[in-house]
Image (spheres, grey):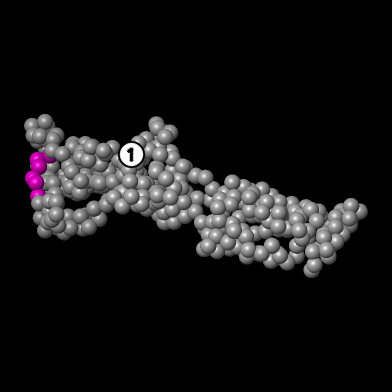
Amino acid sequence: MSGIMRILSAAGLVTLAAGCTLVATEPPRDRAAASARADSDYVLGPDDQIKIWALGVEEIPDRPFRIGSDGGVDLPVVGRVEAKGLTVEQFRMELLKRLEHQVWKPQVSVEIVEFGSQPVTILGAVVKPGTHQLQGRKNLAEILSLAGGTRPDAGYDVRISREKRYGAIPLDSAHWAWDGDYSVAQVNLNSLLAGDNPAYNIPIKPHDVITVPPAEAAYVIGAVVKPGTIVLADRQSISVLQALAMAEGLGKNAKPQSARILRTAPGSSQRTELPIDLKRVMEGRAEDVSLKANDVLLVPDNVPQKAAFRALEAMIQMATGVVIFRP
């Protein structure tokens, strides 16, 4: 269709609309509402998919267009448009500018139908690890929520890695990685979630990598009320009596005087046994020993020794436990 014919065609629609309410001069209401929901400040980039409605321009089909890896998108009538780096509103205005030479009083709406240009990778002890899309502006707490929140075995820090092109992470703990290509920082998870320090809740940038390492833990197994995993606090250790309290005390047939701590030496896969008389510790007649990361406190019971060792092997294999305790 020539430019003159296109202008006459669009003008005819407007003239007809003056006498007939069945012909709309605006995009359909549901489409306008969908466009309004799009964040006009969202910066477009490769792999985003957009849908365009242009009144009187039948050549632009009602289907999504994917922005290419080079940041451009090819459209009928208007040609190739460089979308990368433009907000949704700026992109819409660029389309209007180009259509002014083709259509009388062009009307255009743009909707994002799939976000793809702002991935953030979330790893570690979160419910839904993987790659998520920012879909606009989000802060650290919102991104953790997008990943389903942290798991019960989450550690006490969140680590952030950011590409150099997005600048340094705005935190006191930030520093540049050895190659200078990434800014890295960490924040205390408890302080972030409690809102104790609002500065921790930083804006997240595309391609950030956020990691919530699992906490180091000790384990209580055997003849206790609730065997399970004990997440260690910042001090990285917990006393035997504290661990026993979290396990809700000894079981009925416990032999506390024969308890032992199974400890793995650094750099070794072999566990050593450290005997501990829990009865004397509980009576205050022996030292309350500290459990370190990966220690297993085993409280035996009165079953025959061979059966006890078979039970021990089974319990160590499930050392993550059914119950997770956080100090």
Q: Quadrant of residue 28?
A: bottom right
Viewer-side residue, 319 vs 18: 18
Q: Check if residue 276 falls in the magenta segment.
A: yes
Quarter of the picture containing the N terminus is: bottom right
Judging by the rendered image, the residue that carries numbered circle 1 is 173
Q: Position of residue 36 (x, y in %)?
A: 66, 48
Q: Quadrant of residue 172?
A: top left
Q: Residue at x 67, y 58 (%)?
A: 52
Viewer-side residue, 141 vs 222: 141
Above or below 308: residue 193: above
Q: Residue at x 36, y 52 (%)?
A: 181
Quarter of the picture containing the C terminus is: top left
Above or below 252: residue 115: below
Instruction: Check disc 1 and give the amino acid type.
Output: Ser
Q: Check if residue 11 falls in the magenta segment.
A: no
Range of magenta residues: 273-278
Q: Position of residue 235 (x, y in %)?
A: 23, 37
